[in-house]
Image: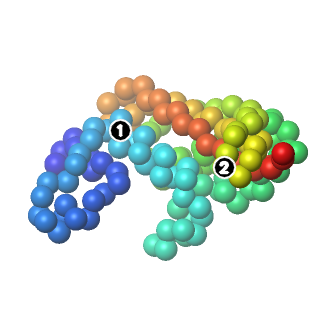
């Protein structure tokens, strides 16, 4: 399986049926792992309680300045990637924080939207790497 990586999420039924697992390339595998790191709360992985992102330990107060949140996010994400994603070097993390009003079933909510971009170099082949995603935090309901 040289040069191939398993695609997430793993489908255990495929293993039980003794079928081939879905695979992806190096860039997709690193992207999947970064997404998993960012969305995992510390302590959630029972084998390694330090696996995940310190980001979720923060209290995302809607009143916190966007610059404060930006700095927290960049430090937390970069720290996790440096520790757990050894296939990536020269890691640069940038975050853009904005507020968005969302219409939801329970009414309108204002949330902080955090866009995270990770750039670096793939250690195996020195190719440039880019990952980008976003998520919402800090619900504030109003009518």
Q: Residues within 10 Å of mark 1 (few under 14, many from 20)?
A: some
Image coordinates for residue 44, horizontal then vertical, percent: 54, 68
Where, quadrant-wise, is the C terminus in this rendering?
top right
The mark nearer the N terminus, 1 or 2, is 1
Q: Nearer the viewer, residue 1 or 9?
A: 9
Q: Is residue 72 left or right of residue 62?
A: left
Q: Is residue 11 left or right of residue 31?
A: left
Find residue 65 and report its horizontal and vertical position in percent: 85, 39
- Which of discs 1 and 2 lies nearer the camera? The answer is 2
Q: Residue at x 43, y 48 (%)?
A: 33
Please tell me the numbered disc located at residue 105: 2
Q: Is residue 140 above or below residue 31?
A: below
Residue lying farthest left?
A: 18
Residue 120 shows in this picture = no
Q: Residue at x 55, y 53 (%)?
A: 39
Residue under numbered circle 1: 28
Out of 112 and 23, give the one closest to the viewer: 112
């Amino acid at each position: 399986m040289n040069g191939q990586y398993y695609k997430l999420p793993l489908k255990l039924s495929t293993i039980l049926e003794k079928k081939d697992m879905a695979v992806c390339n190096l860039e997709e595998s690193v992207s999947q792992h970064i997404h998993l790191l960012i969305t995992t709360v510390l302590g959630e992985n029972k084998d390694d309680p330090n696996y995940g992102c310190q980001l979720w330990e923060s209290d995302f107060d809607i009143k916190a300045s966007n610059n404060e949140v930006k700095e927290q996010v960049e430090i937390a994400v970069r720290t996790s990637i440096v520790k757990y994603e050894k296939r990536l070097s020269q890691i640069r993390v940038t975050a853009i924080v904005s507020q968005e009003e969302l219409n939801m079933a329970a009414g309108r909510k204002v949330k902080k939207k955090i866009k995270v971009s990770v750039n670096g170099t793939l250690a195996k082949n020195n190719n440039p790497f880019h990952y980008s995603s976003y998520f919402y935090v800090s619900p504030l309901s109003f009518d």
